[in-house]
Image (spheres, rainbow, N blue to C red):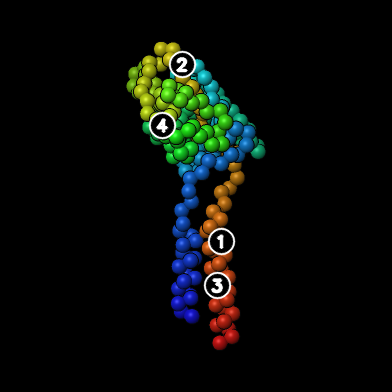
Amino acid sequence: MKRLSMVLLVALVMAFSTSASATLINNGNGFIYDDDLNITWYDLTVANLASYDAVSWANELNFTVNGIVYDDWRLPSYARNELRHLYVDELKNSASVPFNSGPLSNLHYGGSNPDAYWTDTSGGDGVMWWSYFFIGDGSYAPKTLYFPGYALAVHDGNVGGTVATPEPASMLLLGFGLVGLAVLRKRSKQA
């Protein structure tokens, strides 16, 4: 009896301590939520923009979803390596595997000639960082130079999404634990 109680207690602890894996969640309307970084990607790649045009495009995005206005869009952060996280960690891409865009349908990938995506990170006076999407690394280019790149917008938080729910494995363990406790309680009343 004591041993069964300990097993159930361990199962309950495990149910509340398991970590969920990072996921890209399609919230519809082009909003893809990254629950690992708590950011939402806007699934629209705009091509052939100079850095200042890319910044303007992202900053001018404005969406109202379920009565909530989302107008704080920006380019991905080079400092936080958001593009690399998307490409490698979330989409499981590398230079040696076929390109996977996951739930994002508008990503641009140039294969052996990678495309540069602008970031929101300034590299100092008059320069802006860009990132090669397929390797997550990059360099900088003068803001005034017309260096045609791609733009992908991101917003902090979950745009258009719902409240997160516990992962199924945790709920299953919790359910087994509660059933086990009910059985134990019934047996202890009978004894």
- Name the secondary structure under disc 2: loop
Q: Nearer the viewer, mark 4 or mark 3?
A: 4
The residues tagged by marks 3 and 2 sit, at their Cα atoms, a distance apart of 62 Å
| Residue lying at the far top of the rendered structure | 145
- 160 over 173 or under it: above or below: above
- The percent position of residue 181, horizontal first and vertical second, equals 55, 73
Rendering quarter of residue 176:
bottom right
Residue occupied by mark 2 = 148
Graded by Cα atoms within 10 Å as few (under 14), some (14 to 19) or many (20 or more), the crowding at tag 3 reads some
The residues tagged by marks 4 and 3 sit, at their Cα atoms, a distance apart of 49 Å
In the rendering, which numbered label is found on residue 95?
A: 4
Residue occupied by mark 3 = 180
The residues tagged by marks 1 and 3 sit, at their Cα atoms, a distance apart of 12 Å
- Name the secondary structure under disc 3: helix
Graded by Cα atoms within 10 Å as few (under 14), some (14 to 19) or many (20 or more), the crowding at tag 2 reads some
Residue occupied by mark 1 = 172
